[in-house]
Amino acid sequence: MRRWIRSVLHPDRYHGPRGDRGPFFEGWYYKLVDASGAHRWAVIPGVFLGDDRARGESFVQVLDGASGRATYHAAPLDAFSAASDAFDVRVGASRFRSDGIVLAVEDAERPVEGELRFRDLKPWPVTLRSPGVMGWYAWVPFMECYHGVVSLDHAIEGRLRIGGETIDFSGGRGYTEKDWGQAFPSAYVWIQSNHFERAGVSLSASVAMIPWIGRSFRGFLVGLFCDGVLHRFTTYAGAKIESLEVDETHVRWTVRSARQRLVMRATRAAGGLLHAPVRTEMHRRVDETLQSTVEVELTAIGDGRTLFAGVGRHAGLEVHGDLETLLRA
């Protein structure tokens, strides 16, 4: 019990399954953009357990956000290890922490090596009553999928050599989040950008179908970090979705709390196919792009004042699953 409480209060750390069998997955998502914006990459380490340990594996996924090319580097389950008292994860010779990564992926298709360091991290606040982005839902022991935001925005220093090309990320910006549980939601939309005209602004937004005691509901987690303040719009805090529309070219989404309204309009762009967990395997099915843009406007409910307006570049966008159910919920 004590270990479980510590894990809830430290959502960035490795949680692991209850017992030694699945289905279970846990993965961390590092978004990396160089100072010019020409190089946009995502690196995703993680672990998957099927119904028995024989069906388990660890992995590092690498996505080139400019070309859309994604590679999945599988490794044996025992290549994965994690510290019990800190966010410190290893997959083979690669190491992943909140303040940096060391990559040593030996692969004929796309070898990756190098070290990046992160500074001035902006984690989603954790309190006893609201331990991270999931709020009190983080204390519920039977959720299908849990979510954590390790850093909404941070500076990057260092270089990576990917497939023979050396990329200097010094002066660039990064974002880190994670997911764990039994499987990804059956339908969801995810939008993220921390490249606005105003430095230090970051948006992280997701809406998904959430299984809940024999039924399901549409839950959402939205945070806009601006001028040192995190503006939160979440299901558990009583915020509402005013509209959600998805077509072939755009995602249009408006949420409101008691005092503020947030309007998001994201453009859809071609991306790469990432592996995502279903209950039986890591299945190649999720189309993710880092080439979208997202227009954001934050206004006050009372007098309609515009509190922030801007366009986020190099935006991450995923639209997946049974959208009809998600949109009409």
Image (cartoon, rainbow, N blue to C red):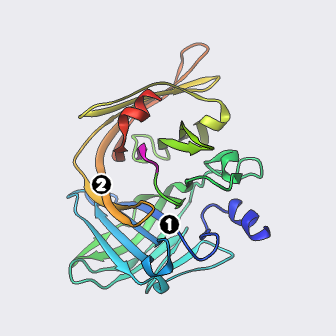
Q: Could you tell me residue 281's position as x and y percent?
A: 39, 67
Q: Considering only order in the chain, which callout, 2 or 1, is on the residue closer to the N terminus? A: 1
Task: Locate the N terminus by quadrant.
Answer: bottom right
- Give the residue pinned by disc 2: 37
Residue 299 percent location from the top left of the image = 53, 23
Q: Among all residues in the image, which is located at the extreme front? A: 214
Identity of the residue drawn at 49% across and 71% down = 51
- Tag 2, which secondary structure? loop
Main secondary structure along the magenta-highlighted residues: strand
Residue 212 in percent (x, y) is at: 60, 43
Q: Which residues are magenta?
A: 185-192
Q: How many marks?
A: 2
Amino acid at the residue labelled 1: Phe
Camera-near label (1 vs 2) is 1
Say few, some or many: other residues with alpha carbon within 10 Å of mark 1 (under 14 / 14 to 19 / 20 or more): many
- Along the viewing direction, whichever of 52 and 175 lies nearer the viewer: 52
The residue indicated by pointer 1 is 25
Spatial CA span between label 1 and label 2: 31 Å
Q: Secondary structure at mark 1?
A: strand
Q: Nearer the viewer, residue 241 or 154?
A: 241
Instruction: Name which residue type carries label 2.
Output: Gly
Residue drawn where x is 41% and y is 43% of the image: 187
Disc 2 residue crowd, few under 14, some 14–19, many 20+, Cα 10 Å: some
- The quarter of the picture where residue 3 lies is bottom right
State if disc 2 and disc 1 touch (CB < 8 Å).
Answer: no
The location of residue 146, given as percent across then percent down, is 57, 55
The residue most toward the top is 303
Toward the viewer: 200 or 241?
241
Residue at image location 29% in from the left, 33% down from the top = 250
Where on the picture, by quarter, is residue 142?
A: bottom right
296 sits left or right of 105 in the view: right
Q: Is residue 191 magenta?
A: yes
